[in-house]
Image (cartoon, rainbow, N blue to C red):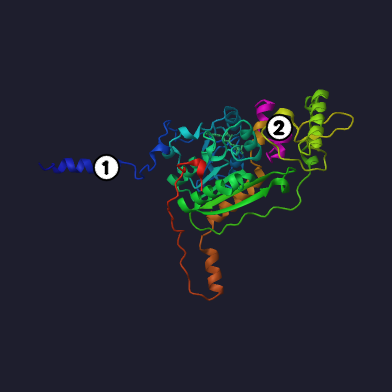
Amino acid sequence: MSVPASKKKAAKKAAKKQPKKAVKNASIRQRSIVVREDEVPYRIKTSATKESLRFIDLFCGIGGFRIAFEKAGGKCVFSSDWDKFSQQTYEANFGERPHGDIHTVAVADIPKHDILCGGFPCQPFSIAGVSKKNSLGRLHGFDDVKQGNLFFSIADIIDYHQPAAFVLENVKNLKSHDKGRTFDVIYRTLTKALGYTVYTKVIDAKSVVPQHRERIFIVGFREWRDFEFPEFPKEGPLLGSILESRPDPKYTLTDHLWRYLQNYAAKHKAAGNGFGFGLVSKQDTTRTLSARYHKDGSEILIAQTGKNPRRLTPRECARLMGYPDDFKVIVSDTQAYRQFGNSVVVPVVERIAEAVITALRRPSEQKVDLVLRDEKKPREIRTPQARLHTSIQYPPKKRSRIK
Ligand SMILES: C[S@@+](CC[C@H](N)C(=O)[O-])C[C@H]1O[C@@H](n2cnc3c(N)ncnc32)[C@H](O)[C@@H]1O
């Protein structure tokens, strides 16, 4: 029996209404909570205009990436972090509460964007995180079921939305974790499976803040772009430039804690280990501020004359991470230390954001054209990088055996 023409027409119309992009990987994409796509309140001294490049702020913490990309002229269209205290700080500063667990957000519900930013959790890969997990008999890297697979959530979002660029940040140890295999999977996923041109660089923040903090930045472009990581000055500021003139006496160590830290350091020195506290003065650069600074503050202690050393105040931690002084710190000291210890160094990301946005705004053939004309060679047409979808699977089926 033939179907009447009117019914065929109706069926065609209904089919047209279906979303154009098929959701390819249902197991990863079956995320239940629907995200509001309407515009969220948007505070800000921002240079954002209608033509601004749109970015998303994944694993946003307290918004280090956001400050940097807004300063470079970007407009944030989505943020996510599941930590309720980080959400409070983010909301106090940006007028918007980030969405929660990224696993519960449907990829298709994330607004379309030009740049994806994400400082994905580093504990599964950091030296401290790995040795802690080893000592507790827990899995690390991609095998850390709760946090190790978050890179693949990012890959999933890139795959679906195909942003023009992404900027990812992690600990330096990401490169050497699991004898380089972890990084290899990440790199191959971004380049071979997703087809992006990828640049990586380990940057030490000590050239812009008085803190030795090495982080790897991974920048990718969907189409070829004339991009170089920015240069950083050789000499950076010293600790004296960020210290408060009259810190509250509560940050001075008690006799008990100071004695404990000295004994602990002496014990490890005798055993030939380098562990111990990091005592610094105004002329120094500090060690890396960690999320566990709230415990005893031992990695950065400020020497004081005639008194026990003291910890940094939360405001000093904010400055050590390059946050402006009008950044609101509204949580407890413990939470503030955790938040700044987890953050990116804002002025480092500012420079990268500027370089990425400049590269995106510059016509991609520009440099090649000039070179070719100088050399009087026939003009070559540059096409966007071919997509090299290969057999790489992500997430790898057997994450413990990444080859
Ligand atoms: C290294 S911190 C990033 C900090 C951020 N770049 C900043 O400048 O403050 C990683 C963040 O990922 C968040 N996170 C971890 N697992 C998450 C998940 N499943 N969904 C959303 N956020 C998550 C943590 O709460 C943490 O704030």
Percent across and percent down for residue 352 are 61, 50
Percent across and percent down for residue 304 are 85, 32
The number of numbered badges drawn on the structure is 2
Q: Is residue 244 visible?
A: no
User: Which SS class for mark 1?
Assistant: helix
Judged left or right of residue 80, residue 12 is left
Instruction: Name which quarter of the figure residue 261 lies in.
Output: top right
Residue named by callout 1: 15
User: Which SS class for mark 2?
Assistant: helix
**Depth order, front residue of 85/260:** 260
Judged left or right of residue 272, residue 336 is left
Ligand 1 contact, mark 2 (Cβ < 8 Å): no
User: Mark 1, mark 2: which one is toward the viewer?
Assistant: 2
The quarter in which the N terminus is drawn is top left
Q: Please, is residue 367 above or below residue 137 in the view? A: below
Judged left or right of residue 209, residue 153 is left
Instruction: Name which quarter of the figure residue 286 lies in.
Output: top right
Residue named by callout 2: 293
**Badge 2 amino acid:** Tyr
Q: Is residue 315 visible?
A: yes
**Is residue 36 magenta-colored?**
no
**Magenta-highlighted residues:** 316-336
Ligand 1 contact, mark 1 (Cβ < 8 Å): no
Judged left or right of residue 153, residue 168 is right
